[in-house]
Every structure is written in structure tokens, then in C-alpha cells.
Image: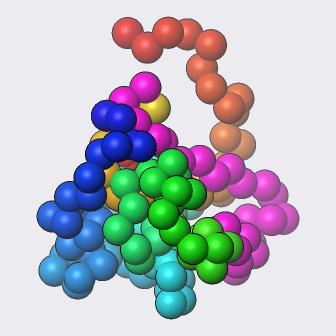
């Protein structure tokens, strides 16, 4: 997936959540951002923070998005972490971009993880 050139698919699952065609458990919302619990969490806290605009990836948002959208996305991560008490114990946020990162949903999303010791950043093993 070359997310720099990929056109936005308006029927991806997060676009449908934004249109309220599919429910989600919202944890935060502002003009530019929606955040909700991941449907298949891999940590006690696993929240997805997404821009409301139609961006495939961070590459895409950084090329086409406004400063306000970029700032709102990052600010939301901090607001949610504080709101959920994660800044006390620590947390991790990451965004998978493209094929090597195993991005499954082609709408930019930041994963916010916390609630347990998360281990090292990346496995040193090659995936099988
Ligand atoms: P990624 O591999 O970075 O594209 O992550 C996609 C994430 O979206 C996975 O963690 C999924 O569990 C999550 N996901 C897929 N569908 C939904 C949904 N309907 N509601 C909430 N999270 C979802």
C-alpha cells in the first residue's frame, strides 16, 4: 500500500463510523477528531484516534491537511491520555502507515495503548 498516492476509499470502516453507519464507543470528539475504543483491544486501554477528514495516512494528512487538523489530532492524544489517567503510568501511541507497517484500515488512525507494561517498542524478530 503506497499511502502517499493511494486515493481515499470513502467506504472504509472508519469512514462508515464517522458517518454513524456503524457504531463505536466514543471516548473523545472535537471538530477535527474522533476517538473510540478499538474493537479488538490488545491492551487494557486501546483507543483509536482518527481525523474526521478523508486521509489515508499521516503522509496524506501532512501533504493535504491543515495545521489545525494536524494539531487537533496530536492534541487529542494527549487529552485522552490525561483523561484516562495514562500519563501517571505511561502509554504508547503509534500509527501504522502502509504495507510494511501492516496498516489494515486505509483511514489514518493513531493507536493509543496503556494500562499495563507494554514491553519493547518492536520485536527484534522478523515476522513469520
Ligand atoms: P491497523 O492494523 O493499524 O490498520 O489497525 C486497524 C485497527 O482497527 C485494528 O486494531 C482493529 O481491531 C480496529 N478496528 C477494525 N474495525 C473496527 C471497528 N469497527 N471499531 C473499532 N475498531 C476497529
Q: In the rendered image, which quarter is residue 125 located in?
A: top right
Q: State whether residue 63 appears in this view.
A: yes
Q: Is residue 28 located in the magenta-colored stretch of the structure?
A: no
Q: Is residue 125 left or right of residue 8?
A: right
Q: Residue at x 57, y 74 (%)?
A: 66
| The C terminus sits in image quarter | top left
Quadrant observed for ligand 1 in the rendered image: bottom left
Looking at the picture, does residue 101 appear above or below residue 47?
above
Looking at the picture, does residue 12 appear above or below residue 42?
below
List x then y, in percent, for residue 122. Answer: 62, 26
Specify the farthest residue to the right. Answer: 88
The one nearer the camera, 35 or 61, is: 61
The one nearer the camera, 71 or 29, is: 71
Q: State whether residue 109 appears in this view.
A: no
Q: Residue at x 68, y 32 (%)?
A: 121
Q: Residue at x 67, y 40 (%)?
A: 118
The one nearer the camera, 16 or 43, is: 16
List x then y, in percent, for residue 108. Answer: 43, 57
Q: Is residue 34 left or right of residue 39?
A: right
Q: Is residue 99 located in the magenta-colored stretch of the structure?
A: yes
| Range of magenta residues | 74-100
Amino acid at each position: 500500500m503506497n499511502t502517499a498516492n493511494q486515493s481515499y476509499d470513502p467506504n472504509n470502516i472508519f469512514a462508515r463510523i464517522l458517518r454513524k453507519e456503524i457504531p463505536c464507543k466514543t471516548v473523545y470528539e472535537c471538530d477535527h477528531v474522533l476517538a473510540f475504543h478499538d474493537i479488538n483491544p490488545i491492551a487494557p486501554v486501546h483507543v483509536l484516534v482518527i481525523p474526521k477528514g478523508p486521509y489515508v495516512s499521516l503522509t496524506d494528512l501532512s501533504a493535504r491537511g491543515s495545521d489545525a487538523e494536524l494539531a487537533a489530532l496530536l492534541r487529542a492524544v494527549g487529552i485522552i491520555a490525561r483523561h484516562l489517567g495514562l500519563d501517571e503510568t505511561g502509554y504508547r501511541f503509534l500509527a501504522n502507515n502502509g504495507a510494511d507497517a501492516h496498516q489494515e484500515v486505509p483511514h489514518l488512525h493513531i493507536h493509543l495503548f496503556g494500562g499495563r507494561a507494554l514491553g519493547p517498542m518492536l520485536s527484534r524478530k522478523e515476522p513469520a
